[in-house]
Image (cartoon, grey):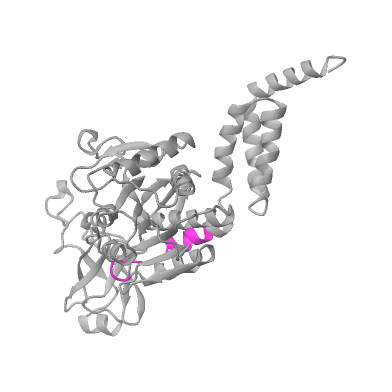
């Protein structure tokens, strides 16, 4: 640059960097992504912060790049757990497989754990503390029960939870039978022969049939299929466009992942938690919040923060006038409802605002339909709130969540917990 002053040189460099920040951001992101998960993202982030903010005075670049870094640097351990956990089978009433995976992961970040008779589990930080706080998700997924086997070997099912007959035809399935897991398919007659062809045919308990390849009821039973065998869809987790997480049972095993990641952050950041924290993964939410009811009476918490999923009402088929306006990618949804304690909700709003975590608001009539209700109305009343992750296509095998929203829910819960004083009294009237 010749003999220009250092100040002028920095000014020109900063101006040039500002106008080319998008191109540089793309190059840096590709470079960082190519380094792999063996790198230390925090050290990379510090170095980029120095050059981007101190050297070139470009705060906007740093903020945008910081969001990308989080996307590229989900810890390898966390990602392995995410896929193992969400690809496991945890139908309502049969959640043991998923719960073992969850407990094996979270135990390293906590001091103790408890389980109950039906399979709900809570990993605990500071189990001796008097003041108790719960963060909670549910682990069960919608499924089917074998209800009848015809003489020809065709298997008829009934719902276990809110399963949808409409999506079943042509799906691959797993029958969890007497001799282990058995592959099967949901059959469906060809379009040529169905009645009311313009309507696609009628799909209900009488018409949706499961086929495991058996030629008779006796053969099906020899294969391990019995009345009461539970059936799940055979689908696995995938990612779309480096932004979306897609699969079955995000409702609500993604919640179990998020609360486990909160425990990891507390451990790794050596955050001081002065109260007892019960990271709770409950069973049987899909048939009436039953697991949460049992755990609420077992733990007797002073405060409960529940996380579950809610609808992205911008996707096709929703009525925003009736269902509100929530969109995946715009942050967690904080809901108003009778069971949601307004003082807890206000603290969540304040934390999100202070930490610059984007969020959305919703209103729920009478009941939240989540484990929030079970905790709020348990014992002598528990101050409770709901943090929801907006997803597309709920109760299908292609539920979709934005990775940024998953990170934001985790951060909001973490930031809320680390600022919460021991023994905080949320009562309206004192």
Quadrant of the rendering where the N terminus is positioned: top right
Q: Nearer the viewer, residue 196 or 32?
A: 32
Q: Residue 243: percent from the left, percent from the top?
A: 48, 43
Quadrant of the rendering where the C terminus is positioned: top left
Per the image, is 83 magenta? yes
Quarter assignment of residue 214 = bottom left
Asked if 221 appears above or below 7 in the picture, the reply is: below
Q: Residue 38: percent from the left, percent from the top?
A: 67, 54
* Residue farthest along the left direction in this orientation: 196
Left or right of 77, for residue 133: left
Q: Nearer the viewer, residue 299 or 169?
A: 299
Q: Residue 317: percent from the left, percent from the top?
A: 24, 40
Q: Residue 189: percent from the left, percent from the top?
A: 21, 60
Per the image, is 332 magenta? no
Quarter assignment of residue 148 = bottom left
Left or right of 49, for residue 183: left
Asked if 386 appears above or below 252 in the picture, the reply is: above
The residue positioned 22% from the left and 36% from the top of the image is 319
Q: Nearer the viewer, residue 349 or 151?
A: 349
**Quick check: can you spot residue 356?**
no
How many marks can you see? 0
* Residue farthest along the front direction in this orientation: 430
**Quick check: can you spot residue 56?**
yes
Asked if 266 appears above or below 415 in the picture, the reply is: below
Q: What's drawn in magenta, residue-wise?
A: 79-94
Q: Nearer the viewer, residue 314 or 326?
A: 326
The residue positioned 68% from the left and 45% from the top of the image is 43
The residue positioned 41% from the left and 39% from the top of the image is 331
Quarter assignment of residue 69 = top right
């Amino acid at each position: 640059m010749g003999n220009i002053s250092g100040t002028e040189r920095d000014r020109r460099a900063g101006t040039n960097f500002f106008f080319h920040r998008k191109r540089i951001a793309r190059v840096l992101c590709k470079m960082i992504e190519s380094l792999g998960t063996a790198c230390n993202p925090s050290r990379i982030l510090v170095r980029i912060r120095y050059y981007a903010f101190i050297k070139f005075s470009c705060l906007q670049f740093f903020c945008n790049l910081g969001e990308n870094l989080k996307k590229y640097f989900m810890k390898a351990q966390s990602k392995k757990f995410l896929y193992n956990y969400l690809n496991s089978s945890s139908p309502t009433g049969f959640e043991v497989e998923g719960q073992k995976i969850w407990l094996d992961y979270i135990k390293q970040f906590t001091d103790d754990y408890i389980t109950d008779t039906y399979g709900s589990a809570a990993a605990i930080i500071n189990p001796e503390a008097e003041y108790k706080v719960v963060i909670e998700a549910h682990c069960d997924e919608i499924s089917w029960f074998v209800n009848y086997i015809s003489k020809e070997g065709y298997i008829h099912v009934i719902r276990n939870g809110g399963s949808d007959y409409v999506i079943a035809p042509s799906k691959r399935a797993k029958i969890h039978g007497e001799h282990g897991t058995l592959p099967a398919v949901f059959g469906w007659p060809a379009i040529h022969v169905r009645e009311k062809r313009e309507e696609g045919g009628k799909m209900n308990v009488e018409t949706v049939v499961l086929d495991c390849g058996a030629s008779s009821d006796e053969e099906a039973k020899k294969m391990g299929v019995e009345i009461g065998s539970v059936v799940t869809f055979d689908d696995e987790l995938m990612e779309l466009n480096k932004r979306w997480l897609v699969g079955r049972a995000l409702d609500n095993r993604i919640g179990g992942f998020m609360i486990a990641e909160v425990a990891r952050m507390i451990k790794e950041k050596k955050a001081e938690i002065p109260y007892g924290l019960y990271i709770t993964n409950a069973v049987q939410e899909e048939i009436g919040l039953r697991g949460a009811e049992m755990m609420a009476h077992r733990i007797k918490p002073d405060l409960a923060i529940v996380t579950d999923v809610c609808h992205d009402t911008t996707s096709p088929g929703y009525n925003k006038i009736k269902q509100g306006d929530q969109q995946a990618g715009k942050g967690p949804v904080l809901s108003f409802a009778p069971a949601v304690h307004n003082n807890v909700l206000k603290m969540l709003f304040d934390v999100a605002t202070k930490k610059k975590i984007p969020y959305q608001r919703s209103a729920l009539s009478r009941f939240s339909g989540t484990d929030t209700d079970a905790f709020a109305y348990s014992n002598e009343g528990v101050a409770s709130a709901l943090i929801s992750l907006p997803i597309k296509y709920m109760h299908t095998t292609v539920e979709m969540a934005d990775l940024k929203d998953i990170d934001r829910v985790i951060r909001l819960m973490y930031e809320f917990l680390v600022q919460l004083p021991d023994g905080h009294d949320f009562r309206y009237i004192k």
